Image (cartoon, grey):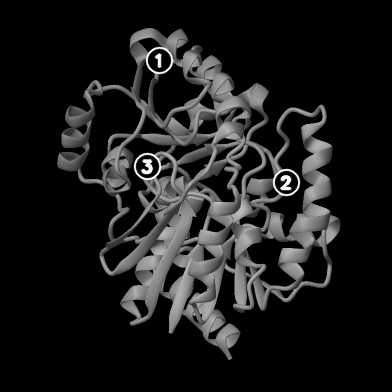
Amino acid sequence: MRIAIVSHYMPPHTGGVEQVAALLARTYADAGHEVSWIACATPLPPGDSTEEGVRLVRVADANVLERRFAMPFPLIGLGGWRTVARAVAGADVAHVHDCLYATSIAATRQRTPYIVTQHVAMVSFGGGLIDPLLATAYRTAGRDVLRRARHVAFVSENVRDWFTQHVAPDLRASLIPNAVDTSLFHVASDAERAAAREAFGIPRDAAVVLFAGRLVPKKHVRSLVDALGHTDAHLFVVGDGPERDALAALGQRVTHVPRIPHARMPEAFAAADAFALPSTGEGLPLSLIEALASGLPCVVSDDPAFAGLAACDAVVRPPLAQLSSALADALAMPASRRATSRAWAQARYGLARFRDAYLALLAEAAR
C-alpha cells in the first residue's frame, strides 16, 4: 500500500509531532508499505529525497508565525499546495497530523482517503485577536478536516474531550496514546549516567533536572528557572526558542544544549535525576513519555493536559506557585516510587499496541 504521511514539519525541526510522524514512517516502511512523508521544509531547503526507504518531500514555506509569535503554523503558497496535492494524490491512503496546519488542509482536499492523528487541543497564544481567530479556525476548517476523515485518533483523553466539547461531538474517533521504544529509553546504569554527564559537560555530583522542549511561553520555562533558583539543583535544557534569555538567571547552574539529534535523547535522560515540564496546552508530550520510560520522576503542571497521569506515583502535578517544593520532592523521591515511572510507560506507551492500532486504521481507511 502507498501511504502519504502529512505533518507541519519534519526533523531537523524539533517537536513531538515530528518525532511521532518519524516513528510512524519507520513503522509503515517496516511493515512493507511504500511511504512518502510530506512536510514543510524549514529549516532545510525544499526538495525531494529518500532516507531509509522513506521518500521525504519538503515543501517551500514561510515560517513567520513561529519566529514572531512562537506559533508553529508554517504558511505555504500555491506552489506548496500543489506539491502536497501531487504527493497525496498518488497514495492509497494518507495519515495527516493535526487538523489545522496548511499542509493538512491541502492534503485533505484530495480524493485520497485519510486518517488524522490529533496531537493537541487549542493552545492559548496570549489572548488578543489570536485566540478567538484560532478557536474559529478549529470550528470551521478544522472541523471540516476531522469530519471527512475515515478515522480520528486522539493522543489523550484531554485532547479528545476538548474537540468533543468545542468542535465536533460525533467524530469517528478513538484514543491512541503516543509511544516510545522502551528498549532505547531505559533506566540508565551508573556508568551510562557518568558518561552522559561528561559528554554534556554537566557536574558529575549535581542534582540534575532536565527540561526538553521548545523554549516558548506555554512551557513556563521562566517559572521553572525561578523555582530552581530556590534550590541547589542544576538545570539541563535541551531545546531552544525565544525564552532562552530566562536561563541566564541560574548562572553556572544551567547547561543549555539548543539541539541534539533525537537519537541522543536517551543519553540526555541518562544525565538527569528528574524531568520537568510545567507546561500548559499539551497533548501527550513525547519527551514526558521518554522520561517515564527512562525511569525518571517527573514534575509537570496541574494543567488538565496531565490529569491522566494522576495515578502514576512518579509524576507530581503542582500549581506553578509550588513548583520549587515539588522539584525538591522529585529529586528526593525513593527508588521504589521512581520505579513506577518505568512500569507506567511500559504498560501504556509501548510500540506494539501503537503499531498494531495504526496499521489496522490504515487498512480500514484504504478499504
Q: Which residue is mark 1?
A: 232
Q: Nearer the viewer, residue 160 or 296?
A: 160
Q: CA distance from mark 2 to mark 3?
A: 28 Å
Q: Residue at x 77, y 57 (%)?
A: 141
Q: Residue 352 placed where, x, y %?
A: 41, 74
Give the number of the mark in front: 2 or 3: 3
Residue 114, by quadrant, is bottom right
Q: Residue furthest bottom?
A: 367
Q: Residue at x 38, y 43 (%)?
A: 45
Q: Residue 190 placed where, x, y %?
A: 19, 40
Residue 109, by quadrant, is bottom right
Q: Earlier in the sequence, mark 2 or mark 3?
A: 3
Q: Say few, some or many: other residues with alpha carbon within 10 Å of mark 2 (under 14 / 14 to 19 / 20 or more).
A: some
Q: Which mark is residue 44?
A: 3
Q: Earlier in the sequence, mark 1 or mark 2?
A: 2
- 191 horizontally vs 292: left or right: left
- 271 horizontally vs 221: left or right: left
Q: What residue type is disc 1 on?
A: Asp
Q: Which residue is mark 2?
A: 122
Secondary structure beneath label 3: loop
